[in-house]
Amino acid sequence: MKIKKLFLKNYRNYDEILLELNDGLNIIIGDNAQGKTNLLESIYVLAVTKSFLSINDKNLIMFNNSFSLIKGFVQYKDNCDELEVLLNSKGKNVKINKKEIKKLSDYISRMNVIIFSSDSVRTFKDSPSSRRKYFNIQISQINKNYLSNLNNYNLILRQRNEFLKIFNISKKSDNDYLEIINNKYVNLSLYIYNFRKKYVDYINKYLDNIFYSITNLHGLKLIYDSNIDNLDSKMFIDKLKNNLLKDIQYKMTFIGPNRDDFYFELDGKNLSLYGSQGQIRSAVLSLKLAEVNLFTDLLSESPILLLDDIFSELDIYKRNNILKYLNGNIQTILTTTDIENIDRSIREQSNIYKIKNGKIISREII
Ligand SMILES: Nc1ncnc2c1ncn2[C@@H]1O[C@H](COP(=O)(O)OP(=O)(O)O)[C@@H](O)[C@H]1O
Ligand SMILES: [Mg+2]
């Protein structure tokens, strides 16, 4: 899929812009604090309905304004959509072809984006919950049902934890009720586990080769670390039972996908603990490029790739190789402070915009 046009009104430091994008590489040049990240963020918000930064939706509205509007025209193989996200003090409204969509899960599986920014690297340094959140969004983009099952899972998890507070182990009715909750909990947990597992396995089909093309190193793997790994329903229920006293003591549930984590291993060693900063960045970028392949395979539409300032800190990159690797089939929107970072031959085939203080000041086809 390709985003052909982007319209912003009162979005961060953009008062109003209409941007036309080409199907291949689009380069946004600008000095610091001019709105490069904001622009990519707006495309991400158009797809996912929230920022990739952990911030409140209200921060996206231009200072001293009451609403923010993002619209995009997205072209698929056979049709096109006009997507719209409206943010105001009451919350948000999303529309597809002018029709309001009530269920966010129906909306966010429509337009697919993969973003790489300095924040993506932070996700792999922060707490496990930020990685769970990340993979939840990615999987929700390719599967509508995942998000609603995840919401149901969170609901039953809360119910279970609430019930643990009043649970009386010697009361039969309490034990019966816990069994009902446990059964639901196990089913939803396994659903989530299976999707996460499949996702990670699929990523690993591509990950190492991509990492090699960037760093000349082999041996990168994404690890899905789950305490319900390889359990069937019965084993899971047993594990919940064995853990019950601890769960009661802490009034929370220790077994399940709420405790999952994801990390990279290079040659069998945890990259966050032993890798260099450059290797971690390259691993995360490789993950993003593997996700481009995964999305393309599973959706038979390529996602839109957003690369925020990838050259500033990544000197080990074979930067132009990465762009050549993308091969023109994937619509890419890339920001940089310095156009010289990009080979002339690649620039010649790109759409280049210069941005200053929330305005497009020039459009050059070099
Ligand atoms: N809600 C907002 N309203 C107006 N301006 C904003 C808002 N949020 C951020 N900004 C401004 O956006 C600018 C940063 O834009 P950013 O896209 O991060 O720049 P860069 O080009 O360095 O990526 C800053 O000047 C900041 O003050
Ligand atoms: Mg930036």
Image (tube, helix red, strand yellow):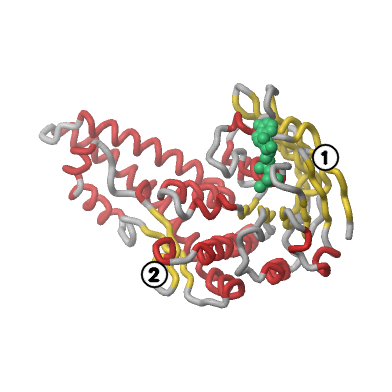
Q: Is residue 86 visible?
A: no
> What kind of residue is marked 1?
Leu
Residue shown at the point (53%, 72%) measured from the top left = 208
Quadrant of residue 215 within the rendered picture: bottom right
- In this view, 280 is above or below 321: above
Residue shown at the point (72%, 42%) measured from the top left = 35
Residue 67: image x %, image y %? Answer: 69, 25
Number of callouts in the render? 2
According to the image, label 2 marks what residue?
269
Residue shown at the point (72%, 61%) measured from the top left = 330
Quadrant containing the C terminus is bottom right
Q: Is residue 167 left or right of residue 66?
A: left
Q: Is residue 139 left or right of residue 335?
A: left
Q: How packed is label 2: few (under 14 Cα within 10 Å), some, or many (20 or more)?
A: some
Residue 229: image x %, image y %? Answer: 33, 60
Quadrant of residue 351 within the rendered picture: bottom right
According to the image, label 1 marks what residue?
18
- In this view, 20 is above or below 204: above
Q: Is residue 143 left or right of residue 97?
A: left
Residue 291: image x %, image y %? Answer: 58, 60
> Of callouts 2 and 1, which one flags the residue occurring earlier in the amino acid sequence?
1
Front one among 341 and 58: 341
Residue shown at the point (75%, 57%) measured from the top left = 338
Residue 70: image x %, image y %? Answer: 72, 36
Element assignment for label 1: strand
Q: Nearer the viewer, mark 2 or mark 1?
A: 2
Find the residue positioned furthest to the left: 170
Q: Is residue 215 visible?
A: yes
Element assignment for label 2: strand
> What kind of residue is marked 2?
Lys
- In this view, 329 is above or below 115: below
